[in-house]
Image (cartoon, rainbow, N blue to C red):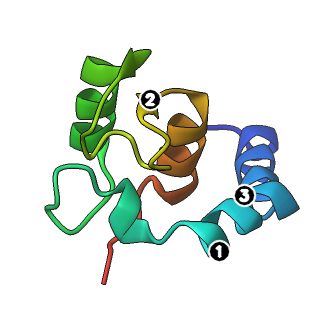
Amino acid sequence: MNAQSEFTLDAAANSPVVQDIIAMYPCSAADINEDGAVTVMDLTEYLAYFNAPCDCRADIDGNGFVGAMDKLILVAHYGSVCD
């Protein structure tokens, strides 16, 4: 990974939008498979339900539909270990 892409990732992680999402939704909400961390396994489960009505853990924002906001929440917490 080059220095420019590392800077971009750091800047995105510290953006006000990402910080707002993190403040509104705890890490545990994005831990879809409930293994204590937000990883590729959570992303895989999210993708299995993407673009569908669902009363499931992949509906992170609780609006009854697995969509873009759920992905934003998952990505904001991606790589985190949840308490």
Q: Amino acid at mark 3?
A: Val
3 vs 53, left or right, is right
- How many marks overall? 3
User: Could you say where residue 76 lies in the image, as x and y percent from the top left?
Assistant: 58, 54
Label 2: which residue? 65
- Check disc 2 and give the amino acid type: Phe
- Figure check: 81 above or below 55: below
Q: Secondary structure under badge 2?
A: strand
Discs 3/1, front = 1
Q: Which residue bears the numbered disc 1?
A: 23
**C-alpha separation, residue under disc 2 versus residue under disc 1:** 21 Å
Q: In front here: 53 or 45?
A: 53
Query: Within 10 angstroms of label 2, few (less than 14), some, or many (20 or more) residues?
Result: many
Regarding mark 1 in the picture, which secondary structure is present there? Answer: helix
70 or 12, nearer to the observer? 70
Residues at marks 3 and 2, CA–CA distance in whole angstroms: 21 Å
The residue that disc 3 covers is: 18
